[in-house]
Amino acid sequence: MALYSAAAAVLSGLERGEGGLKSLVYGSDFPHARQLYALVAETLRYGPVLEALLDGAALLRAEKKLPPPLAKGIKCGGRWKALARRHRARLEAELARLKVRRGVSRNEDLLEPAPGAGPEAPQVPRYVRVNVLKTCVDDVVEFFKRQGYSFLGKAGSVEELRTLSGKKFLLDLHLPELLVFPPQTDFHDNRLYTSGHIILQDKASCLPAFLLSPAAGSHVIDACAAPGNKTSHLAAILKNKGHIFAFDVDTKRLATMNTMLMRAGVTSFKLTQQDFLTVDPHDPKYSKVKYILLDPSCSGSGMVTRLPLEEAAPSAERLQALAGFQRKVLSHALRFPAVQCLAYSTCSVHREENEDVVHAVLQEQGSAFRLVNAFPSWPCRGLATFPGAECCLRASPVDTLTQGFFVAVLERCGEEAAVPSSLPAATDESLQHEEGVEPGAAPPRKRKRKKQRVKV
């Protein structure tokens, strides 16, 4: 029952305000952080429902020796399992009455909406990135078909993703190695996931590496790397040719990240426990770094799956502090002498952390760097707060069926700038027709991808 004990400790820490969910999970001694995170997350999500069921069924009065159902109760996982079996009929009857009272038909509809998301906010699909370092899309599709899933082909619109249900899945309409399943489809125990053949990663989170698109053989920095999904994505784009320097300040997060990267078959990388702001841009070891992915700490306000007891909406002072750090780290990244292209991203919806940061740093840089008009067919653009801000990308659960996200791609100007590396042309037919480029912005970038086939 080590898992349940660890989950109880995390829940108790959250209740006492000792930190956020991720920091407590990765700061624990439990070796399987993702499994622990999933258990605590589901307990938190369904916590109010479980409390209502136990109260309505009067189980705590009938079983007076049992502790409360969350932080302490989860520690007694075996005893609660026996209790649930013993009173199964009573619990099922209370669940049916609870659905009737709330006017819903599914268990998921009993959940509280995410803060600020509104009652009509759509559920985000389950996105599955195929890890081309180990397999290919065709083989993964065939694997899921053998498991009883129906493949509906490539999506033609966001609306098709919105209507997915049951055991059906699609190929994403924008990203060529992304499969889309109905919301809350769980693959944590699927052997493709446990073997590293697939990565569970939100679509918006795939955009930074996808848009940075470093050429095979390049040297790349992932400045704030843990937990490592974007790092593994960079390695897949590089085809494990070249080198990735990945930085993070947390030792335990880096240890978990190392395990994940090894499972994903990533080879040419170096993890360093170091604050990226203390890295010397003129160190000879980084003299060939032409690409940087920068996803710094942010408010996390775009995460529609934020859970109870996590950090509340940031104050104006907190936003300004975050934005100050983000400007500082973005300016530092652009000091690397060989850097030609940088992708800046946050999982925030606040302009202070997004457009305002990019605008301030571009003004500071003068004519040294410019915004790339990245992914012209992407439907949501940056807020029009300065000329060229439309080159940036935004994502949201309503418009793109993803977490809330922001991405800006900057590239060096002048004769020393590298030939713009490409944006995958085959991912969206509309990319074949170049759209208008904002003044002062670089044109869209295109590249070709070869399909790799490795049997699953």
Image (cartoon, rainbow, N blue to C red):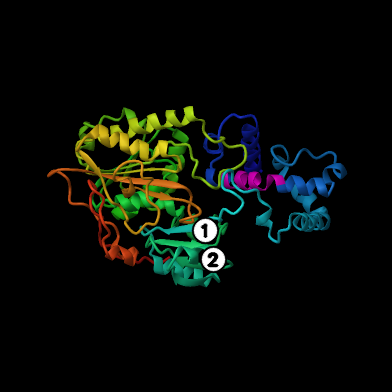
Q: Is residue 359 left or right of residue 46?
A: left
The residue at the far left in this view is: 415
Quadrant of the rendered image containing residue 76: top right
- Check the image and report above or below for 15 versus 93: above
Q: Quadrant of residue 350?
A: top left
> Is the residue marked by circle 2 packed among few (<14), some (14-19), or many (20+) residues within 10 Å?
some
Please, what is the three-letter code of the amino acid marked with disc 2? Leu
User: At x 65% / y 48%, what residue is drawn?
Assistant: 112
Mark positioned earlier in the residue sequence (2 or 1):
1
Contact flag, marks 2 and 1 (Cβ < 8 Å)? yes
Q: Nearer the viewer, residue 223 or 365?
A: 365
Question: In the rendered view of the protein, which quadrant contains the N terminus?
Answer: top right
Per the rendering, the mark at residue 418 is none
**244 displayed left or right of 305:** left
Give left or right: position of 263 versus 13. Answer: left
Compared to residue 321, the image places residue 356 above or below, namely: below
Residue at mark 2 to residue at mark 1: CA–CA distance: 8 Å
Residue 452 visible in the shown view: no
Q: Position of residue 440 (x, y in %)?
A: 22, 46
Residue on which disc 1 sits: 125
Q: Which residues are magenta?
A: 37-48
To which residue does mark 2 refer? 164
